Image (spheres, grey):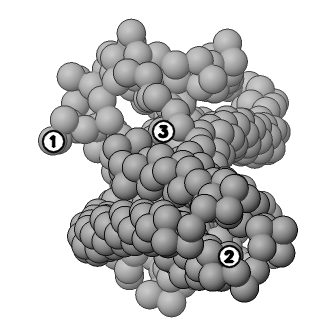
Amino acid sequence: MRVKHRSIRVDIRTSLYTLTLFLILPVAISLIVMLYSADSYQRSISRMETVTSIMPVISEQIPEYMWSVVAGRQSFEDGDVYGTIDRVNTTLNSLIASVPQGQYIELSVARRTMETLRDYVSQIETGMTMGRPVVVCEAILEEVRSVAALIQEMLNNYISREIGLVSRAGVALHKAVLVATCLELLLVIFTLFITFRMNRHLCNSIHEPLVQLEHFAGEIATGNLRARAPDTSVTELSALIGQVNTMAMKLETLMEQRRQEQINLQKAELRTLQAQINPHFLYNTLDTILWQAEAGKSSEVILLTKALSDFFRISLSAGEDWVTVSQEFRHLSGYLAIQKKRYRDILDYSINVDSAMNDCVILKLLLQPLVENALYHGIKYKRGGGNITITGCIRDNRMHFEVRDDGRGMTQEQLERVLAAIHADPAGKKTNSPDLKIGFGLCNVDQRIRLYYNQPRGLSITSGAEGTTVCFSVPIRGREELKHD
């Protein structure tokens, strides 16, 4: 299933925007509500101050001025009573325009009543101009005072209404502040919860792939080049994991190529060692045939020539590394027949092989080097000669082989040095140490068994005063499993 990727940068940006929105939104709403309430409150206060400023003009200044005119103390020309009335009317018109609809009834009535007040002032002016009695003008002056008092009462009613509105607005603002505070607390709690969830989700989305990548790197460090880190939904880490997996794949391929090259190199070295061994044996055998021919023993020459022919035919085996068990033992019989002619007085041998193994496949030239080692380093140095016994059997679904001689054995110290030489000298390189020369052929066979059969153990060696025994076991293989290397 395809993994849906997401970017860490996008996740962080989304988290930041979400948290910012949750934090700014309640603050913005509260600020708007408080600014609106404060502005409304400030406008109400300003209107009340304006009304308060014109009330003395209406209730005191105009009546007192008209009284001075009626009493003869001042004339209309001395004061600007109509200008004062006009300014009051302008102020009332401005207040009516600024007051919300339905809340300016008192102001509207007061504005109309100001026209009545203006009429009374006009009547006093006409009376004073026409020389009417003071009593008549005083009666009109009383009407001016009554109208001014009425206007003042209306303005007081307006102020009372405005105070009531301001009071209710204050209560509403208080409630709004409480509600906004509660909402802000809830939003803060919710924001903290969302922050915790998003933070945990973001940390997990980064932490888990990193842990997997760390585990994967540890697997590679321990040599498990087949390990692969699973894909992740995080875009940035997905690209990194893909590159690391590609690197591991290429490293595995390179290591496999290197291993195969090393195997091929070791095989080439071992084949070279085999080529180095065969000429030495060939020279000795040809010398033996030559001696027999000079002695006129034609039958012996024929026997040795046939044995040598069988020996090299199987040794070469058309360049193949695998032969049947019957071929391997025929090759060994040819070798022992030749050596028996050379060491007639000191060498006896016996070959015992289970016939069920004849058609099984085995890596060639495993037994001959062991027999050669037994002959040259065991039997040859024993006074009176000795016997070499070669056995082969099937046990536990494996082929078991044993080469035993009753020649000169090895001390425990010598055996340990030979075993050390086998493990320390895998290529079977020549050395001047006698004990390591003993292990030369053994090392070759041991390495070939472990290399071709891919098993950790090759030869098993025991030795003492009674002789030396070398044995090994390999899996059973049929002809159909014959491999060409």
Residue wearing tag 1:
396
Q: CA distance from mark 2 to mark 3?
A: 96 Å
Q: Nearer the viewer, residue 232 or 160?
A: 160
Question: Label 2 is placed on what type of residue?
Answer: Val
Graded by Cα atoms within 10 Å as few (under 14), some (14 to 19) or many (20 or more), the crowding at tag 3 reads some
Mark 3–mark 1 distance (CA, rounded to whole Å):
52 Å
Q: Which of the pair 448/81 is nearer the observer?
A: 81
Residue holding disc 3: 233
| Residue at screen point 52% across, 33% down | 5
Which disc is residue 69 wearing? 2
- Please say if 267 is above or below 143: above
Callouts 2 and 3 close, C-beta under 8 Å: no
For discs 1 and 2, the disc positioned in front in the rendered view: 2
Q: Are marks 3 and 1 in contact (CB under 8 Å)?
A: no
Residue at 49% over, 65% down: 136
Nearer-N-terminus badge (2/3): 2
User: Secondary structure under badge 1?
Assistant: loop
Question: In the image, residue 39 lies at what x, y percent?
Answer: 53, 65
